[in-house]
Image (cartoon, helix red, strand yellow):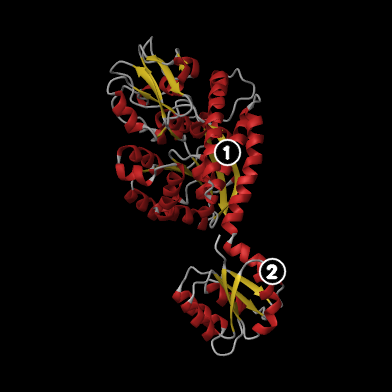
Amino acid sequence: MDKINILWADDEIELLKPHILFLREKGYDVQTANCGDDALDLFKEQVFDIVFLDENMPGLSGLETLVKIKQLKNDVPVVMITKSEEEHIMEDAIGSQISDYLIKPVNPNQILLSLKKNLENKRLIREKTSSAYQQEFRSIGMTLSDRLSIDEWKEVYQKLVFWELELNKSKEEGMEEILRMQKTEANTQFSKYVINNYQGWVNGKDPNPPLMSHNIFKQRVVPEIDKNESTFFVLIDNMRYDQWKVMQPILQDYFKVDTEEMFCAILPTATQYARNAMFAGLMPSEIEKRYPNHWLNDEDEGGKNLHEEFFMNEQLKRLGKDIKTSYTKVTNNQAGKKLAENIPNLMGNKFNAIVYNFVDMLSHARTEMEVIRELADDEKAYRSITVSWLEHSPLLDILRQIADKKARLILTTDHGTIRVTNPSKIIGDRNTNTNLRYKQGKNLNYEKKDVYEVKNPLDIFLPRQHVSTAFVFAKEDLFFAYPNNYNYFVNYYRNTFQHGGISLEEMLIPFITLSNK
């Protein structure tokens, strides 16, 4: 690595000779100046990696010199050194974009620490993160070999997401690849776990089933309604746990997180099933039986999620909540702006449900539009677009208003999504649904090792359209492809984000309660 070049400006520079010698012995080049003007002359002539500035110098002050340095080259870190601890001087320095602030007398180790913090922090963070994940890798690997409970699976997934985000920040590509492999292994084991336990979860035979879509209102939402004057339930369609974690820092300016947990989306992890189940408080076959005029199956024409408000109000009545409610679905930017304008009028309601559809549309648009595919080329980019959208969307304005009005906020989703990479061949008739992660229909022909097959849908409370109707759910990162035009189909859909099947990303989804700061 090239030597680091330091510019140190101080009117008492002679007194700092021991510090300068110390730095030179450590391998740093140090250029000195007695005043701001001389410092600027040197700065214009040479390339410096960092500048140390005395705040109180004759002629140009440290703050004045700082402003001129930033005008010349804004990205060079500047450390202000001063005898004064006056608050206004610190505020002026910070406002002028200093990188660090040291109080005289400084010792050599303080200077060295400031150098490492400002010039070597990325390398040090990268090395530390890589080392820490290597240790965690072994721990997670050993955990995956055990028989895990659903709570333990949630913990594993939380750890994987944490390290994925940390390694993304440190840009440690080698470790990122190892984590991807470990995540793949985790999904393999999780798929086996779900296949072995899912039927018991939904039919009441498992004594400790996970919290699932159809129980969310009863077990989590209604208790929140009882505690608060006004509660907003905001469902961001298709929001994964990792997307919540990158959005969280933005929301923490306005809210404090009271609770954060995961629940399990029902199968199929698709809007038509999971979200209707959530709002109805019933499994899909139960919805069809109780409200036959409000349920459409895959092969039926028409919108499949047009009755969520009806389901919600019916469920609240069954749960003994005869309260004033509202339901709003936002599917475009204009609708979001309209809702933002209407938030003050909703404050009189005990409960307000908002379904925000952007993330789901982003996932599908990435498949269909080349420009979005390029912008969201991988998991990291996909998360980045999510953050950018939130920062500039009407939703953030809506959430700010909720915080300002001191209303309670519940933030959740109906299912997640997974980046699919490997095809699995399937054959079905013309009435088979088009989803790439689950299929339901008659006479399905598929690779049994790749799927969770349910020959009688009623066993897991899914509608059975015909006597011979079966459901199959893709495991891990697989997606279904027909033999006809196979290569084109596979190339088109590989590395796209899909949902409907079994994976950590699709099934273990966030439920967060927040209150204003």
- The foreground one among 483 and 461 is 483
- The foreground one among 419 and 515 is 419
The residue under the point 60% across, 53% down is 125
Label 2 CA crowd tier, 10 Å (few <14, some 14–19, many 20+): few
> Looking at the image, can residue 292 be seen?
yes
Please state, as top left, top right, bottom left or bottom right, where the N terminus lies in the image.
Answer: bottom right
Q: Classify mark 1: helix, strand or loop.
A: helix
Report the residue that reaches farthest toward the bottom.
59
**What residue does disc 1 label?**
160
- The foreground one among 161 and 128 is 128
Mark 2 to mark 1: distance in Å?
36 Å
Q: Would residue 206 appear left or right of 502 to someone viewing this image?
A: right
The x, y position of residue 140, in whole percent, is: 63, 34
Q: Would residue 281 appear left or right of 292 to someone viewing this image?
A: right
Q: Quick one: label 2 or label 1, which is nearer the N terminus?
A: 2
The residue under the point 66% across, 70% down is 23
Label 1 CA crowd tier, 10 Å (few <14, some 14–19, many 20+): many
Is residue 513 positioned above or below 285 on the image?
below
Is residue 209 positioned above or below 108 on the image?
above
Is residue 465 positioned above or below 342 on the image?
above
Q: Which amino acid lies under the numbered mark 2 shown in the image of this protein? A: Gln
The x, y position of residue 517, in whole percent, is: 58, 57
**Is mark 2 in CB contact (under 8 Å) with mark 1?**
no
**What residue does disc 2 label?**
110
The x, y position of residue 487, in whole percent, is: 31, 26
